[in-house]
Image (cartoon, rainbow, N blue to C red):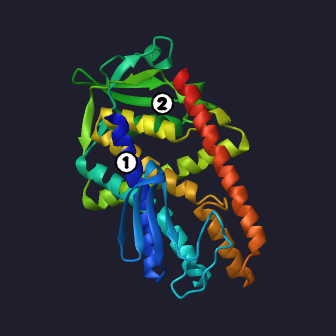
Amino acid sequence: MGIFTALIILSFLIFFHELGHFSAARFFGVQVDVFSIGFGKKIFTKKIGKTEWTISMIPLGGYVKMKGQDDSNPNLISYDQDSYNIKKPWERIIILLAGPFANFLLAFLLYFSISSIGIPKLLATIGDVNKTQPAYHAGIKVGDQILSINGEKIIYWEDMARTIQNNPNQLRLTILRENHYLDITVVPKIQNVKNRFNEIVQRKMIGIMPDKNSTHIVHYSFNQSINYAYTQTQQASMLIINGLKKLFSGLVPVEQLGGVVSIVDVTAQASKVGLLTLLFFTALISVNLGVLNLLPIPALDGGHIMFNLYEMITKKKPNEEIMYKLTLLGWMILLSMMLLGFYNDINRLLE
């Protein structure tokens, strides 16, 4: 059931992406020949107007085929009035941007929905104290509630973690213990820890863990939800961009590159945890699709945008032979990345 849910979600994200392209194309009067979810053998086809709507056997991708555009053969050009090719470069760029934009918009709407449902946040209550770390030696105990650090009000665990990193070495904690207020001074240790990219980084640590049973459901107003959704979409985008930078620069090993199998597997696991977890992960995948499609690889939206920017700047179309060869190279790069991701996925499953 989890895998089925994951495939449905992935297909929905792809549909939303392609719907962005479709909507922008139709706005500019471009005929869309095919709107397909999936690849391979067609299992459902319905002709609506001039567009063939298709669901194919392998639900791991999708595409919108516009009149005069063919990624597999850029030489197939049409000069009819409803063709993609005759549109101005800026119009084509908007059509190309519409797909990734749809993914960012969907992520924004998902984050907005999450904030409307209510977000569980860990309170700044101590659930465990490491006896070898500064907090224990300073006298902090399990059950203590941290109220402020160096005069800065603390409510949630994430506030405390951020404040510890941003303050000087000496921390003055005001805590609540059995209805008594206490001031405790702690000097954190600088320790090596692994970040989300599996890199070794230095962090200020005092040796405490949260009480996972001490949570509060946070509900946002409409304006707060807008701000939360925008911030989360921006942060998710930067997370993926930084991850790609580290991957291409070699700071993150290629063994960590995941493929569709990983996405389906993790989405299936998220669906079993609960609705909020599934919505969070779906939003992250949607942002991921948006960012990846903007990469300047000829077979992707970003590559086509580069071709059109070249035409806008130089006032002449790119050389068709060069564009064809670059597109083939782009497909080779994409195929290599997909195979590497698939190989890594299989290795992780076999471990």
Apparent side of residue 277 relative to residue 236 in the rendered image (left or right): left
Q: Taking the image as drawn, is residue 193 in sight?
A: yes
For the point 47% across and 20% down, the residue is 207
Q: Is residue 330 above or below residue 24?
A: above
Q: Residue furthest top?
A: 131
Q: Is residue 22 above or below residue 117?
A: below
Q: Nearer the viewer, residue 160 or 280?
A: 280
What percent of the width, then of the height, locates residue 241? Answer: 59, 51
Circle 1 is placed at which residue position? 9
Question: What distance separates the C-alpha of mark 2 from that of mark 1?
Answer: 45 Å
Q: Which quarter shows the N terminus?
A: top left
Three-letter residue code for mark 1 = Ile
Q: Nearer the viewer, residue 49 or 306?
A: 49
Q: Nearer the viewer, residue 29 or 184?
A: 29
For the point 67% across and 62% down, the residue is 298
For the point 51% across and 42% down, the residue is 260
Image quarter of residue 83: bottom right
Three-letter residue code for mark 2 = Leu
Mark 2 burial class by Cα count in 10 Å: few <14, some 14-19, many 20+: some
Q: Earlier in the sequence, mark 2 or mark 1?
A: 1
Q: Residue furthest bottom?
A: 81
Apparent side of residue 48 relative to residue 24 in the rendered image (left or right): left
Circle 2 is placed at which residue position? 171
Image quarter of residue 344: top right
Label 2 residue SS: strand
What percent of the width, then of the height, locates residue 348? Answer: 55, 26
Apparent side of residue 106 relative to residue 169 in the rendered image (left or right): left
Q: Nearer the viewer, residue 58 or 317?
A: 58
Q: Which quarter shows the C terminus?
A: top right
